[in-house]
Amino acid sequence: MFLGLLSERQRHAFAIVARFITRADGTVLDEERWYLHILEKEIGAPPPPPGDEGEIEDALALFDNPLSRNILLIESLAVALSDGRFDPREEEAISLIARRLGMRPEKVERFRIYAERIVKLVDEGEDLIATR
């Protein structure tokens, strides 16, 4: 949704973070694959293969201002929620990201509620465009 406001390097870094989140629970469901596909189109490049935690740390370091950090958190939460559930391991991945970005838990919760609405709207939009 807001990835176009990021720099090219930040979009690439987000792709690394998105892949990290989708693999956090050990399973990448079809809904998550579809959401990654949509993000790939928005980013303009396929997500890279998952990396190690050091690569995640390097990716997070590129989000160096409040706007980019907020976008990262909202978009990351949408990825985590794209399969309709918030697995505890995905929640831990989001918590790690939020801590590294210096985000307060109240802000994370507010963004989570917003991301749930985004995912519902994306799902509704998919239904609308798929209708023949």
Image: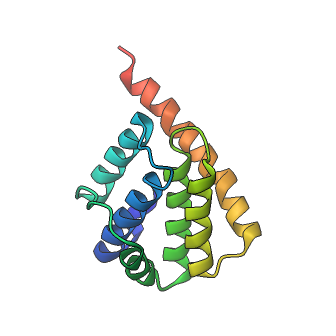
Q: Position of residue 72 (x, y in %)?
A: 49, 68
Residue for point 44% across, 52% down = 22
Report whether 64 appears left or right of 19: right
Residue 42: quadrant of the picture? bottom left
Q: Residue furthest front?
A: 26
Q: Position of residue 34 (x, y in %)?
A: 37, 39
Q: Residue furthest right?
A: 106
Relative depth, front residue between 119 and 81: 81
Residue for point 35% across, 66% down = 16
Report whether 102 appears left or right of 78: right
Q: Position of residue 124 (x, y in %)?
A: 52, 30
Q: How is the image coloured?
A: rainbow
Relative depth, front residue between 39 and 89: 89
Question: In the picture shown, does residue 66 fall above or below 31?
Answer: below
Residue 77: quadrant of the picture? bottom right
Report whether 78 appears left or right of 15: right
Give the position of the N terminus as an image quadrant.
Answer: bottom left
Residue for point 26% across, 61% down = 48
Question: In the picture shown, does residue 95 fall above or below 33?
Answer: below
Q: Please give the count of numbered marks on the rendered protein.
A: 0
